[in-house]
Structures are given as structure tokens and as C-alpha cells.
Amino acid sequence: ARNHTDVYANLSLLGPPVNKEDMPYCGPIHVTFPSGLTLGEIERKNPLVVRGGRYRPPNCEARHRTAVIIPHRNREHHLKFLLYYLHPFLQRQQLNYGIYIIHQAGNYTFNRAKLMNVGFREDDRNTYACDAHPKHAAIAMDKFGYKLPYKMYFGGVSALTPDQYLKMNGFPNNYWGWGGEDDDIGIRVSLGGMLISRPSLNVGRYKMIKHKHDKGNEVNPKRFNMLAKTRHTWKNDGMNTVEYEIVSRDYQPLFTNITVNIGTEA
Ligand code: NGS
């Protein structure tokens, strides 16, 4: 068992300890998607998480304050799995953190990047942690064989300080539907005079929850044209132009939910 560095969870986080003799070395979390999981169960497993999905280490002053912003619509089932792993993971890193779900109201085409801008603006604390440069965290995803699919890939999970976020004028507001917004964000990093920072391949590992193509998130046919123009448009589209209306804000035990009307394509 000792050679199987790949598959063992930090068992102390996920359940009662196993017999010492059989105990594997701690290593990467073994991600499975348990059926019948409930939010109540996740709450019970995370007794120190308080209203709005916030946590701070009880016995020390955290070095980092982190807001995790999750663009969301109609994937309640996935959200549950994410919370199940994310809360213990962030606590193990001794972060002072909050989890914010930015929920796009209505059925109009999904817009992930604009939802991130809303999250940045509405988060009532600072997003710290990060690196000297914007960090692309999801460098090794299972669906790409735990390798980067292409050099400029900036999809999935990233981590930026407020300064870095504003230096690139946030994310674009006008990528409706699937594709391209992450590439635009990657281009903005360099237009803002920054580099992309990445963890090593054996650290930035992610397992994707498989899903069918979402209704209301059709492939965006304009994405290549838009990407070709990013260097002319980025200064006039981003945090300095984001417009939306908050529909509701509620503080659930495991997260803060912000439902927002972000409008439709111009
Ligand atoms: C690129 C997309 C990105 C996307 C990446 C991975 O082609 O938005 O594939 O896609 N860029 C454009 O379409 C311009 S994935 O394999 O995850 O479906 O993130």
C-alpha cells in the first residue's frame, strides 16, 4: 500500500481512523462522490463553520484571508460534493475563509466571468492568499490526463489578490455561454503586465464532476472573434463597467448565497 501515493485520502478528515496497521501514508485526497450526501451531514462534519460559510482557525491568527467565489446555477448536486471536500480542505490550510455562491437568476444564457466580477464586488471581505502573480490553480485536471491542455489555459480555478484582479480590470462581462472567457482572462493577465503563476503538476490536481452539457450554457459562437479583440476591449469591459441587480443575499450554514440578475447580451 505504501507505494500507492496516488490514491489515499487524508483519512483523518474524511472519517474515523482505520486500523493503524493498515494505515496508509497521508497523500492526495481520494475523491469519490458518495450517494445520499446531505448538507446537514456536511454541517455536522464542519462544526466550526459559521453562518454564511465562514471559518477562522480557533487557536491562531490566519496568515491568509480567502474568499472562494463560485459561479453557480442548477447544479445543487455538484455544489454538495464541492462543499463536502472544500470546507475540510480550507480548514486544513488554516485559512480565514468564506465561501460565496454567485447564483445567476433566471434562465438566460450563463455568464461565468461576469458572475466572478459580481463576486469580487459583493464579497465584503478581502481576497488574500495568492502569489506575486495571478495564480492558475487548476493546472492538472483529470480530464486532461493531469496535464495542462495548452500553455495559455487559465480555466477552472484561479486565485488573485484584489490588486491583481483590478490591474486586469477584472474579468470580461460579455462572454455569454460556454467557452473563451477563461482564455480572455489569461490574456488580461499579460495585458495587465503580469505573469501566470502555477503550482506544480502534482499539487494543482483536480477531479471534475462529470456532467452533461448544461441547458442555457450553449457554446458561444462569438468567442474567437472576441478573443482576437481582447487587447482593444479589456480596458472598457470589466470591473469598471459591471452592472447587475442583487436579487437576494442569504447566509446559509455552509455558504453565503448571492442571487443576482446580470441582464442579457447587449
Ligand atoms: C478551449 C476553450 C476554453 C475551455 C478549454 C477546455 O478551447 O474556454 O477549451 O475546454 N476556449 C475556446 O473555446 C476559445 S474543456 O475541455 O474543459 O471543455 O476552457
Image (tube, rainbow, N blue to C red):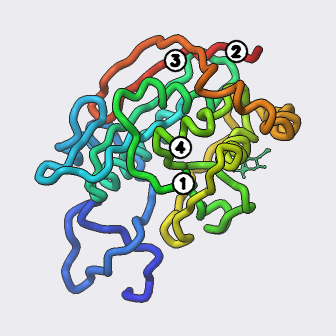
Of the image marks 1 and 2, the number of the one nearer the N terminus:
1
The answer for how far apart the CA atoms under marks 1 and 2 are is 32 Å
Residues at marks 4 and 3, CA–CA distance in whole angstroms: 24 Å
Tell me the residue at 50%/48% (across/down). Answer: 159
Q: Amino acid at mark 1?
A: His
| Mark 4 or mark 3: whose residue is earlier in sequence | 4
Q: CA distance from mark 1 to mark 3?
A: 29 Å
Name the mark nearer the viewer: 1 or 3.
1
Q: Label 4 vs label 1: CA separation?
A: 7 Å
Secondary element at image label 3: strand
Residue 7 vs residue 237, the one in the foreground: 237
Dots 1, 2 in contact, CB < 8 A:
no
Badge 4 is on which residue? 164
Foreground tag (4 vs 3): 4
Give the residue at mark 3: 260
Residue 245 drawn above or below residue 195: above
First in residue order: circle 4 vs circle 1 = 1
For discs 1 and 2, the disc positioned in front in the rendered view: 1
Measured as percent of width and height from the top left, residue 147 is found at 65, 68
